[in-house]
Image (spheres, rainbow, N blue to C red):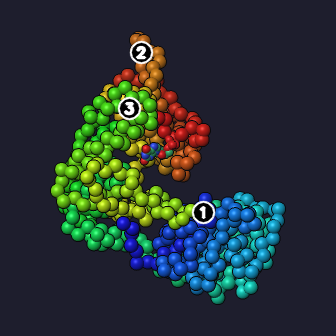
Amino acid sequence: MSLLHDQRPVFVVDFGAQYAQLIARRVRECKVYSEIVPCDIAPEELRRRDPAALILSGGPASVYAEDAPGMDPEIYELGVPILGLCYGMQLMALDLGGAVPRTDVGEYGFAELTVDAPDSAIFDGLPVTQQVWMSHRDSVGTVPKGFRATAHTGTTAIAAMEDPKRRLYATQFHPEVAHTPHGQEMLRRFLHDVADIAPTWTMVNIIDEVTESVRAKVGDARVICGLSGGVDSSVVAALLHRAIGDQLTCVFVDHGMLRLDEAEQVAHVFRDNFHVDLVHVQAEARYLGLLAGVTDPEEKRRIIGEEFWRVFFEEATKLEGVRFLAQGTLYPDVIESGPGKAAKIKSHHNLIPFPEGVHFDLIEPLRSLFKDEVREVGAELGLPDEIVHRQPFPGPGLAVRIIGGITAEKLDTLRLADAIVREEIGRWDENREVWQYFAVLPDIRSVGVMGDERTYGHPIIIRAVASADAMTADWARLPHDLLAKMSNRIINEVPGINRVAYDITSKPPGTIEWE
Ligand code: XMP
């Protein structure tokens, strides 16, 4: 189910930009609904979908490359306001009769922009000189007929251009990145002032709209939802409960690999606070049986994933009248566009291993949302902070943070140590800089001495990283006193641990998790 929205969308036309999703998010931060579409989208399709504006993304290609992605020029004739960014600006210039001479002078990184037309709608009220972020080789040499150049930098004579009559605007720099401090303001001016779009995309509106569309789709059927304790499934559950109340049943498969008190918290929040009909399946013993002696991380993941669906469908098929299965699929999971790729919206149906003779229709109420929007919806719905701002946590849970075989005893050990790490870093007032922090239990033992006794115990490894998106990460520079405190507490409070190590590997070459 897609999130039907009253607001006409702004399409980010994707020319293979690394920033396409970021542009869409920035547009949404202006309270305007936005989607990514591939650049080979046909004019008829655009006309049918009636966007309120287009933003042409950047792209890795040179406009002169043999397979340089383009867009049907008829699209400029639709009367839709367009903002071209970087490659999008060059393409706009070429398509409309301007010139983009080949130069060998690129411009990468920070640049000082001078606005030559302060009356331009997108620069209105912004500083005449300001910092922007550039990343390009070619640039526009002559603007198309009807356009005027509106800004320059030391290297790039035409760093922005516009034809206000046709509502066509373009910048060579990237307003969407944080390195362009006034970039968001420019986007806002383009969307609100130039394209005249009302800022009505808010989380409150989204909740109302999802509620309406879920009610319309579900009627009086029952919906089942797998709850994991993670942000996405929790928000789906809270949202659906708001929409259809008792028609929702949540199945919480507790695989026993969660952190200290997490399972109780999930049960408490949904059963006691939200009064959701919750089936809490305590399956730790079952999982431990399956995992006994398994040391390969992929094998652990496979076993845990498959067993989840087995347990889930055992419960689901006990209930009468279930027609729908709700899933926490997010927008980045479904979008696949860019040059050469059709506007494929991936179906998650085929990822669900329905047993013979069982089938439910999918409900995916978060399908249009980015993760930060899901968190906002969660907060708006009254989910507690621990869930809304939960750190990323692998589905297979502590199973991937215990290296080697998994036993109930090792799980207890890791849970205790991990709770100490979370408590201590959680108390540190600069912990906002840390993306993720946890403990790992490796499969080694070493000699130590405690009191007068020789010990032969396991170490605990503390992992704490700074990151923006988990794609790259740096180890967090935790204060020595904090490390000392955690080390002391872990050794004193967690039986069997005689050593604590801190992981000082960045990603790459390391990963965030150990496995
Ligand atoms: P790595 O270890 O590859 O992890 O650097 C990148 C990010 O992904 C998280 N992660 C997972 N998240 N299910 C998830 O939802 C998983 O199976 C999973 N495995 C890793 C990891 O915690 C980090 O934030």
Outermost bottom residue:
165
* Ligand 1 within 8 Å of the CB at mark 3: no
For residue 168, the mark is none
Q: Position of residue 84 (x, y in %)?
A: 64, 73
Left or right: where 76 falls relative to 264: right
For residue 455, the mark is 2
Secondary structure of residue under mark 3: helix
The disc, 3 or 2, on the residue closer to the chain's N-terminal end is 3
Q: Residue at x 76, y 79 (%)?
A: 98
Amino acid on which disc 1 is placed: Gly
Q: How many marks?
A: 3
Are the residues tagged 1 and 3 within 8 Å (C-beta)? no
Mark 1: give few (<14), some (14-19) or many (20+) Cα within 10 Å: few
Quadrant location of the N terminus in the rendered image: bottom left
For residue 414, the mark is 3
The disc, 1 or 3, on the residue closer to the chain's N-terminal end is 1
Q: Residue at x 50, y 70 (%)?
A: 34
Mark 2: give few (<14), some (14-19) or many (20+) Cα within 10 Å: some
User: Is residue 206 positioned above or below 395 on the image?
Assistant: below
Q: In which image quadrant can residue 13 be found?
A: bottom right
Name the residue tied to disc 1: 340
Amino acid on which disc 2 is placed: Thr
Q: Position of residue 219 (x, y in %)?
A: 23, 69
User: Is residue 244 positioned above or below 251 on the image?
Assistant: below
